[in-house]
Amino acid sequence: MAYNAIIVDDSQPMRSIIIKTIKASGFNIGIFFEAPNGKEAISIIKKEWLDIVITDYNMPDMNGIELIEAIKKDSQINSIPILVISTEGSKKKIDEFIKKGAAGYIKKPFTPELIKKKLNHILGETDEASFENSDDGLDF
């Protein structure tokens, strides 16, 4: 199944890096939407079918925490999982992301393997590569 995602980051080059990294990871994304801040993201999220929101924290107009709060307050979109990818790596800030409703967190910089692992976990997918390389659970 292909998933639709929105990448929310005020840096166009960083949005491109995240998209390229997800593609390189082999995770099955159908359509990528992009927004430079939380306000524009909310507009897209309300119009498009999305399976996950991937957001930065530090952005103008509406930062990542404010975006999480806005999503979680809206009954039409509050079930969409949110992954935060940010340079903000303090335990206090990560705890705040999770407390507000983020499903996961990745500190920049990141690898394709890490982002695939997080997306698999958040969206309930199995990691086919690790399953194929394991005899666990097979009874033949």
Image (cartoon, grey):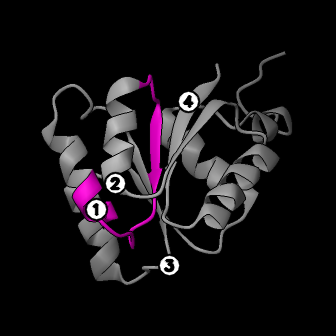
* Disc 1 + disc 2, Cβ < 8 Å: yes
Q: Quadrant of residue 32?
A: top right
Name the one closer to the observer, 95 or 13.
13
Amino acid type assigned to the residue bearing label 2 in the image: Gly
Disc 2 vs disc 4: which is toward the camera? Answer: 2
Asked whether, in this view, residue 68 is left or right of residue 41, the answer is left
Residue in the picture at 43% in, 25% down: 48
Of marks 3 and 2, which one's residue comes earlier in the chain?
Answer: 2
Of marks 2 and 4, which one's residue comes earlier in the chain?
Answer: 4
Residue 83 coordinates in the image, percent (x, y): 44, 52
Q: Quadrant of residue 105?
A: bottom left
Of marks 1 and 2, which one's residue comes earlier in the chain?
Answer: 2
Question: What secondary structure is found at the residue carrying circle 3?
Answer: loop
Q: Main secondary structure of the magenta part?
A: loop
Cα–Cα span, label 4 and label 3:
24 Å
Question: What secondary structure is found at the residue carrying circle 2?
Answer: helix
Query: Is 135 covered by the magenta stretch?
Result: no
Residue 132 coordinates in the image, percent (x, y): 84, 32
Residue 139 coordinates in the image, percent (x, y): 78, 18
Cα–Cα span, label 2 and label 4:
17 Å
Of marks 4 and 3, which one's residue comes earlier in the chain?
Answer: 4
- For label 2, the crowd category at 10 Å Cα-Cα, with few meaning under 14, some 14 to 19 and many 20 or more, is many
Q: Which mark is residue 4?
A: 4
Disc 1 vs disc 4: which is toward the camera? Answer: 1
Name the one closer to the observer, 87 or 125.
87
- For label 3, the crowd category at 10 Å Cα-Cα, with few meaning under 14, some 14 to 19 and many 20 or more, is few
Amino acid type assigned to the residue bearing label 4 in the image: Asn
**Which residue was labeled with disc 2?**
38
Q: Which residues are magenta?
A: 48-67
Question: What secondary structure is found at the residue carrying circle 4?
Answer: strand
Q: Which mark is residue 87?
A: 3
Q: Which mark is residue 62?
A: 1
